[in-house]
Structure formats: C-alpha cells, structure tokens
C-alpha cells in the first residue's frame, strides 16, 4: 500500500509567485546559506496531513467536499516579513498574511480541523498563523544583516482573492519537494 504525503493548502497566483521570487532573490544575496523556497512551491498550508494510505485519502477528499458551504471566496493581503520562532533564533523566514474582516481563513482552518479530527488527524496545538514560508534555516547563526535588510526593504503590499482550497501531494526528492494537486475545492457555491 503506497502512502501519500499530503496537506491542505491555498495556492497563490503565478504573478504573486514571481513578485515573491524577486524578493527572495534579494534576500538570498544577504543570506545564501538559508534554504530558500522555489517560487513554484509557494503556498499557504492550512493543514498538514502527513503520510496517509489511499483509503484514508478518499475519506479526506469526501470530508473536504463540503468546503464551499463554509466561507465564500475572500481576500487576503501580505502584511509583513517575519521569523519563526523569532528574529534572534530564526528557523523560518515567512511572509505574513492579513485576513479579511470576516476572519474567513480562520473559519476555514477551524472547519478543516473539525472535519478531519474524527479521521484521526490531530488538531494543531499551536495557534494557526497564516503565512507563506520563504526560507528554512538549518543552522543557527547571526542573521542581523538579513533582519536589517528586511526592515529597510519591506515587502510591497499585495492583495489577492482566495477562490479555492487544494488537497496537495508532496513527493520528497533529492532536489527538494515536488507538489501536485490531488483535488481542488471551489469556495463558490
């Protein structure tokens, strides 16, 4: 039985991927040792599912099919650049996403958590923080130059509309993760 490494996500437009990629290129010059994300892999993860068997994958697809009843298409905007857990001991460089006034992304996240918990997917213990991962830091070090650069070169504000949620498969290869869409769920009724 072949397992699939899966997650539920929101894809972003090619235009936004290009804008972010240009920003990453500038960050790469300051901190080339960070493992920067390839533009084609940029997405907003709502729920990581891990390695799952085909029968469970079908149940997940079934549960997610009611997603259009949860929220209508909504807008988000990129708010800022930050670090997890913080700028002094960074492990991840991210772009924060600002939610719409209806908190649609949080409603969506909570609904997915509720629907998938009975299937054996544990609820996330940390507070959901909508973001796009730009880079991962394997080795701790001094990143003051990067922090200063980010503070002086803010990411331009960008608004975009969320029309669908995607169930994704992640295939880990030597060259990095390769993502493919398994199923797309429209938020429009």
Image: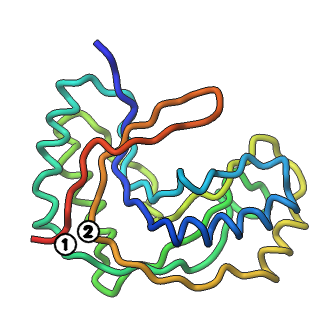
Q: In the rendered structure, are the residues bearing label 1 and label 2 in contact, judged by CB atoms less than 8 Å apart?
A: yes
Dot label at residue 20: none
- Residue hosting label 1: 71
Instruction: Determine whether, in the image, residue 52 is placed left or right of residue 41.
Output: left
The quarter of the rendered structure image containing the C terminus is bottom left
Residue at the outermost top position: 1
Badge 1 marks a residue whose secondary structure is loop
Label 1: few (<14), some (14–19) or many (≥20) C-alpha neighbours in 10 Å: some
Name which quarter of the figure residue 49 lies in: top left
In the rendered image of this protein, does residue 76 appear above or below residue 136?
below
Q: Position of residue 117 (x, y in %)?
A: 22, 42
Instruction: Determine whether, in the image, residue 86 is placed left or right of residue 132.
Output: right
Q: Position of residue 61 (x, y in %)?
A: 18, 42
In the rendered image of this protein, does residue 39 appear above or below residue 54?
below
Between disc 1 and disc 2, whose residue precedes?
Answer: 1
Badge 2 marks a residue whose secondary structure is helix
Name which quarter of the figure residue 84 lies in: bottom right
Q: CA distance from mark 1 to mark 2?
A: 7 Å
In the rendered image of this protein, does residue 184 appear above or below residue 171?
below
Q: Position of residue 143 (x, y in %)?
A: 86, 60
Residue found 33% across the figure and 72% down from its top: 162
Label 2: few (<14), some (14–19) or many (≥20) C-alpha neighbours in 10 Å: few
Instruction: Determine whether, in the image, residue 115 is placed left or right of residue 5.
Output: left
Coloration of the structure image? rainbow
Instruction: Determine whether, in the image, residue 129 is placed left or right of residue 138.
Output: left
Residue found 68% across the figure and 62% down from its top: 83
- Residue hosting label 2: 107
């Amino acid at each position: 039985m072949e397992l699939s490494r899966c997650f539920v996500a929101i894809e972003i437009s090619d235009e936004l991927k290009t804008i972010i990629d240009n920003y990453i290129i500038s960050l790469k010059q300051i901190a080339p040792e960070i493992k920067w994300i390839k533009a084609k892999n940029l997405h907003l993860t709502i729920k990581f599912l891990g390695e799952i068997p085909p029968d469970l994958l079908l149940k997940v697809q079934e549960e997610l099919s009611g997603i259009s009843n949860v929220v209508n298409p909504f807008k988000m905007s990129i708010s800022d650049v930050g670090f997890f857990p913080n700028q002094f001991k960074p492990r991840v460089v991210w772009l924060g996403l600002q939610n719409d006034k209806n908190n649609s992304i949080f409603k969506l996240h909570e609904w997915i958590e509720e629907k998938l918990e009975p299937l054996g997917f544990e609820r996330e213990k940390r507070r959901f923080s909508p973001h796009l991962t730009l880079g991962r830091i394997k080795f701790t070090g001094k990143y003051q130059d990067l922090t200063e650069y980010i503070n002086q070169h803010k990411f331009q504000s960008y608004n975009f509309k969320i029309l669908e949620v995607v169930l994704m498969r992640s295939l880990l290869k030597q060259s990095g993760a390769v993502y493919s869409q398994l199923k797309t769920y429209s938020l429009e009724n």
